[in-house]
Image (cartoon, coloured by chain):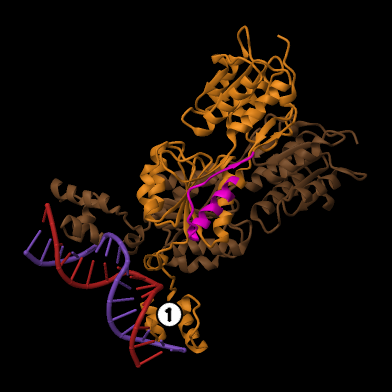
Chain colours: A brown, B orange, C purple, D red
Amino acid sequence: MKDVAARAGVGLKTVSRVVNGEPGVTPDTERRVRDAITALGFRRNDSARILRKGRTASIGLVLEDLADPFYAPLNRAVEEVARAHGALLINGSSAEDAERERELALAFCARRVDGLIVIPAGSDHRYLEPEIAAGVATVFVDRPAGLLDADVVLSDSFGGAREGVAHLVAHGHRRIGFLGDQPHIHTATERLRGYRAAMADAGLPVDDAWVSLGTTAPERVRREAERMLGGPRPVTALFAGNNRVTVTVVRVLATARRPVALVGFDDFELADLLSPGVTVVAQDAARLGRTAAERLFRRLDGVLEPPRRVELPTRLVVRGSGELPPAEG
Amino acid sequence: MKDVAARAGVGLKTVSRVVNGEPGVTPDTERRVRDAITALGFRRNDSARILRKGRTASIGLVLEDLADPFYAPLNRAVEEVARAHGALLINGSSAEDAERERELALAFCARRVDGLIVIPAGSDHRYLEPEIAAGVATVFVDRPAGLLDADVVLSDSFGGAREGVAHLVAHGHRRIGFLGDQPHIHTATERLRGYRAAMADAGLPVDDAWVSLGTTAPERVRREAERMLGGPRPVTALFAGNNRVTVTVVRVLATARRPVALVGFDDFELADLLSPGVTVVAQDAARLGRTAAERLFRRLDGVLEPPRRVELPTRLVVRGSGELPPAEG
DNA sequence: CTGAAAGCGCTTACAG
DNA sequence: CTGAAAGCGCTTACAG
C-alpha cells in the first residue's frame, strides 16, 4: 500500500479510500491510484484490516463430517446465510472426536471468527467460556452444549422416534428392535427414549436384546441387526436411529429370509425408489443449519437475550417399509 | 498480551515465548505468565501473528456445492490433507456461477490463504494471475482452468464415458441417448465426446435428438428423457452425464412402460440396491480431492516444476441397469 | 534466561 | 479533497 501511494504520488489514506470505495476522492486521483494498483499487482491484506477493525466477517462451523449426507446440506445452509451477511465460512470435521472438536473450535477462535456454530462431539464445552466472554457468538446445533448455557437448535428426536415406533406398533408389531448411535450422543439417547416411550404407551415390554447403541460402522450394525433377526423370538420390525444405520439395515434386509418392517430416522436420497420404499422420520437438515446461522447473526447484531433452545419438528414420511405387517414367525 | 506481560511482571517477548511453547523460560516465570493468561482470559490473536509471519496456515477451496454428494467427499478429503499439514480450510459454493467463484477465490486470497483449490465454474481464470504471481499456490480440480496454465487434477471423463457407452453398445443397443450437464462445463463436453467416440467406434449414427446438454434441474432432465423415450424411434438406452442426472433418470425409468438400459457417470449411495442395480462409471471424488491437496502442499513446500495435468482413471461398475437388452419396439 | 525497539499492512481520528 | 501520525497485537532481530 505504501508502494502504491508512492507510485501514485498520494498519501496512504487516499489509497485506503480508493480500495474501500470511500467517497471524497477526485476521479483523477482515483485513476492514478488504480493504475498504480494494477501496475504493482497490489492485493489488500485482510489480516491487517482485521487487526484494526475488530470484526473479521467470518464464522466457524464445526460439524461431524463434511461428507455426511445429513450434515452436508446443513453446511450449505449455514454458508448461504453467512454469504447473505457478507461473511466467509471456515469449517471442519470433528470426526465425532471431542478433542478434535475442541482444537477446531479454538483454532477458529484464534483466527477471530465473529461467531461459532458447533455440532457437539464432546460433552463438556466449558473450554469455550473464555471465548464467549470475549464476545464470540456461539450457537450449538443438532445436539445441546455440555455444561454450558448457550443457544441450541435441535430436531425433536424424542418426539420423532416416538412417532416412528408408534407407527410400527400401529401396524401390529410387538417385538421391535432399536439400532442407534453411540450412547454419549444426545440424539441417540433421545431417540432411544422416544422408542421406550412408544413401547410403554402401547403397554409393550422391551427386551434388552432388542436395543443396541454403538458406532454406526456397517459391520457392527449388520451384526446387531442379524442378531435381533435371528434366535427363537426375533424382532419383526426395526427402528434405525439415523441415516447411516438405516442404509446398513436396508442392505441387511435385502438379503433377509422374511419381510421385516423398517422405519429410519433421517430421510435420504432415493429412499422412495427402493422396494419397498423406506418409511422415515425426516428432519430438515438445511432448516436446522439456517435457523442456527440466523440465530448467530442476530446475536452478532447485538441481540441480548437469554440462551434459547429451539426445537424443530420432524415429519413421518410413509413409503412402505414401515407398513409391512409382522411376519409369521 | 501487553496486559498479561504487565500482570506477570515480564516482558512482551516472554509472554510470546510461553504462548508459543518456545524454550528458554524458567518454570517459575512460565507459571506466572500462565496464571496471568487465565486470569485475564487472554486469547492469542492469529491475525496479528499472520501479519508478521507471512504464512496463514490456511487454504481455500471453491467448489460447486458443499452439499452435493459428489463434491462433499472431495471437500472432506481436502480437509484431511490440510489438517495433516496443520492448515485450516475455508470453503464456499460457487453454485456454478463464474462471478461467485471469482468473488470467493479473491475473498480467500484477501484473507491470505497460502493456497487455493478451485473447481472452476467460470471459463476465464486470468483474474487469479496477480494472486499466483504474488505466491498463492493454486490447483484446479475436476475441470481445467480457463486461459491459465496451472496444475489440474481430473477424472478421465472422455475415457469413462466412452467405456460406459461402449458397454451399452456391447449389450445390443443402437439408439442410445446422452443426457449431460451444461455445455460450458468441461466434464460435460468431454463425456459427450466420449459418447460420440463410442458410437463412432461401433459405426453407429447419432441422431441430434438423442443428445441433450443443459442444466441438471430435474424438470429439464425429466422432460428430455421422456422426449427421447417417446416418438416413433425411441432410444433403448440412456447414458447419464453425472450423478444428479442419473438420479432423475432412475426416477423417470421407474415409471417407464418398458425396460430401458441405463449407465450413469458417477457412483452414488444405494445404486446397488435399486432394481435393477444401476451400472455406473465411477470416479473417486475423495482421491481427486486428496491428489489436488497433496499437489498444493507440495507447491507450498517450494516444489518448482511446470504445471501438470493429472488424469485419474474411472471404473465401470456393472450392476444390472446397463446390461438390460434393447426392448422390442 | 529475559526484554526494549522496530515493524508487519492496514484503519482511525484528526488536522489541514 | 487529502495526508501525517498513532496504533491494532503480535514476531523478529538484537542486545543484555
* Frontmost residue, B166 versus B288: B166
Q: Disc 1: which chain?
A: B
| Name of the residue lying farthest toward the top | B232
Q: Closest to the observer: B173 or B148?
A: B148
Q: Is residue A50 left or right of residue A105?
A: left
Q: Would you say residue A107 is visible in this rendering?
A: yes
**Residue at 19% across, 60% down:** A6
Q: Quadrant of residue B272?
A: top right
For image coordinates 80% across by 35% down, the residue present is A254
Q: Position of residue A90 (x, y in %)?
A: 48, 54
Towards the viewer: A329 or B173: B173
> Looking at the picture, how far across and down is residue A231, in whole percent?
91, 45
Give the vertical position of B134 relative to D6 (above or below).
above
Horizontal and vertical percent for residue B288? 58, 45
**In this rendering, does residue A123 appear at all?**
no
- Residue at horizontal 37 percent and vertical 47 percent from the top: B129
Q: Residue at x 89, y 33 (%)?
A: A328
Q: Inspect the magenta stretch and tell me whether residue A272 lies in it.
A: no
Numbered disc 1: secondary structure: helix
Q: Mark 1 — residue?
A: B15
Q: Quadrant of the N terminus of chain A?
A: bottom left
The residue carrying pointer 1 sits among few (fewer than 14), some (14 to 19) or many (20 or more) residues within 10 Å by Cα, namely many
Report x, y in % for residue B88: 50, 58
Residues rendered magenta in the picture? B288-313
B138 sits left or right of A182 in the view: left
Judged from this view, the residue extending furthest toward the right is: A232
Q: Is residue A298 left or right of residue A308?
A: left
On-image quarter of the C terminus of chain A: top right
Query: Which amino acid type is shown beneath numbered disc 1?
Result: Val
Q: Tell whether position B312 is magenta.
A: yes
